[in-house]
């Protein structure tokens, strides 16, 4: 009887998803930043939605967002207000970048 060997799939799926999330998050953040220069204040939500893709995909993005939040108080207050209104799975992602520590 012949033995059948099943090849395991490489971990490319996770890497592809991570690359896709990084690209999509970067594009949405860029659109949000450009849109914040217009008088329509809706684009902060596009920026935060982009961060929801970017933060889990990149530890560097998490550190950068935490640093920016510590430097710009207005952004920290806006993101805190948005975080409080989000559903729990999304709230968990944005809470990784809170400046005042994990008090939740």
Image (tube, helix red, strand yellow):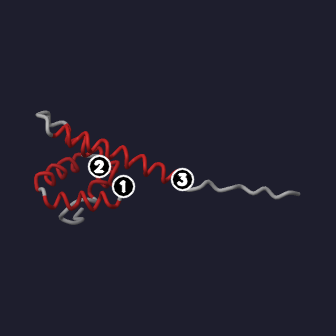
Nearer mark to the viewer, of 1 and 3? 3
> Dot 2 surroundings within 10 Å: few (below 14), some, or many (20 or more)?
many
Q: Residue furthest right?
A: 1
Label placed on residue 56: 1
Q: Nearer the viewer, residue 23 or 48?
A: 23
- Mark 2–mark 3 CB contact (< 8 Å): no
Q: Give the class, few, some or many, for how many residues have Cα within 10 Å of label 1's Cα (few <14, many ≥20).
A: some
Give 85 or 7, whichever is nearer the viewer: 7
Q: Position of residue 51 (x, y in %)?
A: 29, 49
Q: Nearer the viewer, residue 60 or 52?
A: 60
Q: Mark 2 points at which residue?
A: 51
C-alpha gap between disc 1 and disc 2 = 9 Å
Residue found at x 11% / y 56%: 73
Q: Quadrant location of the C terminus?
A: bottom left
| Left/right of residue 34 with respect to residue 27 in the rendered view | left
At a point 14% along the width and 39% down the height, the residue shown is 37
The quadrant of the rendering that contains the N terminus is bottom right
The quadrant where residue 45 appears:
top left
Q: Between residue 45 and residue 35, name the one nearer to us.
A: 35
Helix, strand or loop at disc 1? helix
Task: Name the residue beneath numbered marker 3.
Answer: 12
Confirm or deny contact between disc 1 and disc 2 (CB under 8 A). no
Q: Tag 3, which secondary structure?
A: helix
């Amino acid at each position: 009887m012949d033995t059948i060997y099943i090849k395991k799939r490489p971990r490319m799926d996770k890497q592809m998803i991570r690359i896709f999330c990084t690209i999509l998050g970067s594009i949405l953040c860029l659109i949000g930043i450009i849109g914040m220069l217009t008088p329509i204040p809706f684009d902060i939500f596009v920026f935060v939605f982009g961060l929801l893709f970017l933060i889990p995909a990149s530890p560097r993005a998490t550190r950068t967002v935490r640093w920016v939040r510590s430097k710009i108080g207005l952004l920290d207050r806006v993101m805190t207000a948005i975080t409080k209104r989000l559903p729990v799975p999304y709230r968990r992602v944005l809470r990784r970048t809170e400046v005042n520590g994990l008090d939740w």
